[in-house]
Amino acid sequence: MASFQLQVNGRQHTVDVDADTPLLWVLRDELKLNGTKYGCGIAQCGACTVHIDGMPIRACCFPIGKLAGKNVTTIEGLSVHDDHPVQLAWQEIDVPQCGYCQTGQIMTAAALLDRNPDPSDECILRAMKGNLCRCGTYPRIKNAIKEAAQTKMS
Amino acid sequence: MRTTRRSFIKVSALAGGGLMMAISVPGSAALNRLLKEGESQLNNFLSIDTAGNIIFTLTKHEMGQGSGTGLPMILADELGADWSKISLVRSAYDPKFTSREMGTTGGSSTIDKMWDILRTAGATAREMLKQTAANRWNANTDDLVVDNGVITNPSTDESYTFGELASEAATLDVPDNPPLKEPKDYKYIGQSIKNLITPEVVSGKANYGINVDIDDMVHASIERCPVYKGRLVGFDDSEAREVAGVIDVIAVPQMTGVIEEHHVQAGVAVIARNTWSAIKARKKLRINWDNGDTTDQNLNDLAARMEQKALETEKPVFEKGDYASLKNQDGVEVFQAIYDNPYQAHALMEPINATAHYKADQCEVWVGTQSGERVNNEVVKLTGLSVDQIKINVFNSGGSFGRRFYADSAMEAVYLSMQVQKPVKVTWTREDEIAHDYFHPYQKSIFEAVISEEKKVVGWHSSISRTEGYHSGSQPWEIPYHFENIRTYFEQEPSIVHVGAWRSVAEHSSSLGRESFIDELALKLGQNPLDLRLALLDQPLNRIGTDSFADRVYNYQSLLQSRYLEVLQTVKEKSWYQSAQEPEKGVGLAVENFGRTVCAHVVELTMNNNTYNGFVIDKVRSVVHCGTVVNPHFGRGQIEGSIIFALSALQYGGVEVERGRVMRSNFHDNRLVRIDEVPDMEVHFVPSNDPPNGLGEPGTPPLAPAVLNALYAASGVRVRKIPVLKEDLVREPQAV
């Protein structure tokens, strides 16, 4: 084990874990930030998506040892009052069924809209196809992203 | 506390002021028994405090089907409540609730089972509040108006809020037959009220079993025997113990529960101070397994055995008329087809998990489960503790689809906590979840029809063989179509993997064959498949027997018949089922009931050799009859979700098994439909004021046969299996 410093949601943390520990398990087990979800451990489902320096990254495959100097944003830090346009749109469209994958979906969608404030349908599908939803809320995810894009534009 | 002898509702004063209501369904003595033990023992189903805050106790499991919002909607509507004053507490497993409210959440039965209870509970509280207001005003209750948590006397314009009335209302007698609202007066039922879990989901604060964090808790990851029911011989854990954070390594024996279908596979558990250390160390275990009898089993062998069994069986389970002699008559044509419906994995998004803390005289469990009752019963068996020493905390689930019906992960956690004397959280990896799933049973279906010289179907034979271990309520001979001669055979074959309930259970397996075969018959007879279905449905029903059971069966069949007809007539009226006019396109139809809900899908697709499966589903249009739709947004979501769920099985499903080992491990080889593969979907609910029936499962079964029928229309290739692969769609070379 070794000591690692990391910056999450604007706060500095020190954790004592192995260097190969994925960021996912540091967030969940050490920092108790449970909004980031375990789904597959091999970057196939997107449930663990966080932002590292603004980019959507699968936390399950990102070892803590490679995080030095980077800023991590999790769903808990996406907005102060849960009012990021994507979070508001998710509520407006009432997207979730079981809800488990949705924090990862929201983080991927938020990163997409940061890069492209007015994505085409094709862009939305391309950006979101790494995020699985077993409940099948995909049509509502797509609608919510369009809703968020409109809110952001206006 | 005020109550009447016949009432199943007890009302008492809420501590701190207000009204508390406990319920017990008629016929159950649970509450009456508890009444003797004093009012503190009552189940607190509903309470209204002096500020008018309404707390509803959710006894059913929330796993994405919307029970945590749909159920309080029904209650709030009848109560006349202000929706914004409703909040929820999730009940731990509590034997004070009867098994009807609390035993199991499954079979798409939650709304169905709770409808009467919730409406009666809401109406009772409303009438007691009204009576209190009427007493104060010296008015007649019939003259008062209840809306949005306020009771008004229109003649004087005076009003009271629920909160102002609740304490006094709790002292009144409980009315026996409170009037229920007419459908035209519904305020919340039929509205797309937003899901109460949404705000906590989008903030990341939604709590699932996998988030449980108990003081002094340790984490377990279990390496299980790769072959079903294999046993542990021994293991070398020296390298695993060197991994930082590892606390202990413990053998987990194969366990069978009180209920035989609760199977815990033999394994070796690494106990560590965090999840990652446990997962990492587990890979360094060297384990010697006795893989047992299943180790030489391949899926293809099983499939061949099952097909043989279905072909050779002489085990009739239902017979009507004389199929055997009909089949041998001169001039008739016998037509047979065999359909394959393989194992399927659940692949729910929140991997299986459970946390337990065993102490000498008590045991507490934290788990997302469809049946707290089943978990409780297994903990009693494992620990030898009594029910009042056990607490089962139930969490919302990140998907379940039948998988969390079973108590296996809780059994593992309790067993390990008993060994280490600490709280233990068992988290399954995705690889565990796929390889050691409780798979959808394998089914082979042989359908056969006798066609007369007049080109009519006069006999219907089905012969089903299914892997044993899981039964649903529906039976293979329950078909909605009418034939003079019917013969049904049913066989079971030992499974080579563990099986269990998977969204829409036996209906998914049976529908594929039946709804494909009906299409094949129609085309053989030169008839329109929709018209043939309507003709075979629209026949007089026979009442069998004269007792009350016969009445129930007859009423059930009549309801189903009328719903099948309404659903298919709606498809016809909407002109949704029309042959595709362009080459390489096809349209297919299938219809199925799950319980009282009937669902038809019309699938439009295009052949496309550049895709993984060789075709693209363009559109799915659905007609559903489920009685009253409590929340249309949720209802549409369940049907859309079922379509996508069934599409994953059709495009990527099945589970390969070689030498007893499941050959899939994660989402790269157990693929699921992704957002860029979703067809356009349109869902139409048949308008109805009937009591509501379930929507969680009914959209799943008819999807696969509708696609297979559309594929035939598009390509001329009849596929009788899922998943459909490109190689299944190779066309016969055309004669020049």
Image: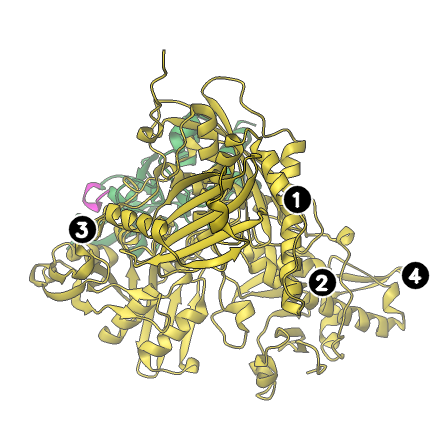
Residue drawn at (18%, 68%) of the image:
B251
In-front residue for pair B426/B488: B488
- Judged from the image, the secondary structure of the residue bearing numbered disc 3 is loop
- On the same chain, marks 3 and 2? The answer is yes
- Judged from the image, the secondary structure of the residue bearing numbered disc 2 is helix
Residue B605 place in picture, x, y as percent? 47, 27
As drawn, the label of residue B155 is: 4
Q: Is residue B427 left or right of residue B718?
A: left
For the colour yellow, the matching chain is B
Which of the marked residues, 3 or 1, is nearer the chain's N terminus? 1
Task: Pick the quarter of the image with the C terminus of chain B.
Answer: top left
| Distance (Cα) linking label 1 and label 2 | 41 Å
The span shown in magenta is A62-66
Which of the two discs, 3 and 1, sits closer to the camera? 1
The stretch drawn in magenta includes residue B163 = no
Given the image, what chain letter belongs to the residue carrying mark 1?
B
Q: Which amino acid does label 2 sit on?
A: Leu
